[in-house]
Image (cartoon, rainbow, N blue to C red):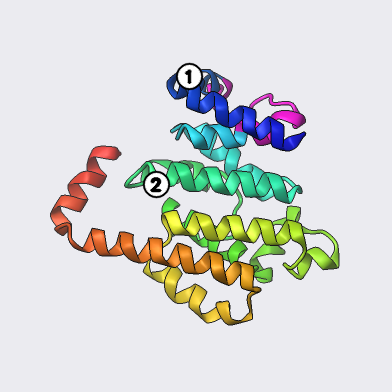
Amino acid sequence: MAGNHMAAAEALTLFDADLIAEKLRALFLDDGAAPAIPDHAVNQIAYSVGRVRLRHANVYRWLLLLLHHNSCFITKATALQSLAWIGIAEASLSWLDDVIRSIDLPYPPGLGTHEIVRTAIEDIATWNRVILTKLNSFAGSMQDWSGATPAALNLRRTAIQALGLIGDGHTLERIQHDITAWPLTLRTEWHLSSLNINQRLYQQAAIPAEQRAAQEQRTR
């Protein structure tokens, strides 16, 4: 049934993405308040806001809160995927610094939004228990803490896919230290993501620094 719901959400975003984005934006207009979304619809909404690249501070806050507080690994994976989708639609996420500061995330206050999001996804991909213990919604069975149950592997695989979209040179270096202990399915996924990261870094290096800065400034 959940698969049918996600397929329906996908079909709607393909039918008229602008219309769906407008309807979704209406759910997030009340600044500071969590949207009134029924539990059974959370995954579909979380998927859809990412699919249409809905740029709104309250959307980003809600997705981060799902990642932080929601105990369902499927919901966490969906939020992660949408965070990455929205991230690639923006050259800079510095306009969301205030949102990040309003959420109690276990990262130094000096980090920028993009770096915090990227680091959080890296922590999930590598199953960094030191950080995950500070995100109390990860507290589950001892099996879950191994990072090797089907639900945990799916979440980690989604994180690795997301890193393919927003990861950088630091990501490549960090993951390389952990990958030898990973299951084959995760190593295979990382191979694809690392190719995407390297390709993006190569393309960015071909653009003069001044031009990249101008592109980022226009998106703020």
**Image quadrant assignment for residue 26:** top right
Give the magenta range. 27-45
Is 120 part of what is drawn in magenta?
no
Is 43 part of what is drawn in magenta?
yes
Of 169 and 28, nearer the camera is: 169
**Image quadrant assignment for residue 168:** bottom left
Q: Is residue 9 above or below residue 184?
A: above
Residue under label 1: 22
Question: Neighbour class for label 2 at 10 Å: few (<14), some, many (≥20)?
Answer: some
Q: Residue 46 bears which disc, if any? A: none
- At 60% from the left edge and 68% from the top edge, which residue is drawn? 186
Residue under label 2: 88
Residue 206 image point, x, y percent: 18, 61
Task: State which tag comes first along the sequence, 2 or 1.
Answer: 1
Q: Secondary structure at mark 1?
A: helix
User: Label 2 sits on what residue type?
Assistant: Ile
Q: Secondary structure at mark 2?
A: helix
Q: Is residue 182 above or below residue 48?
A: below
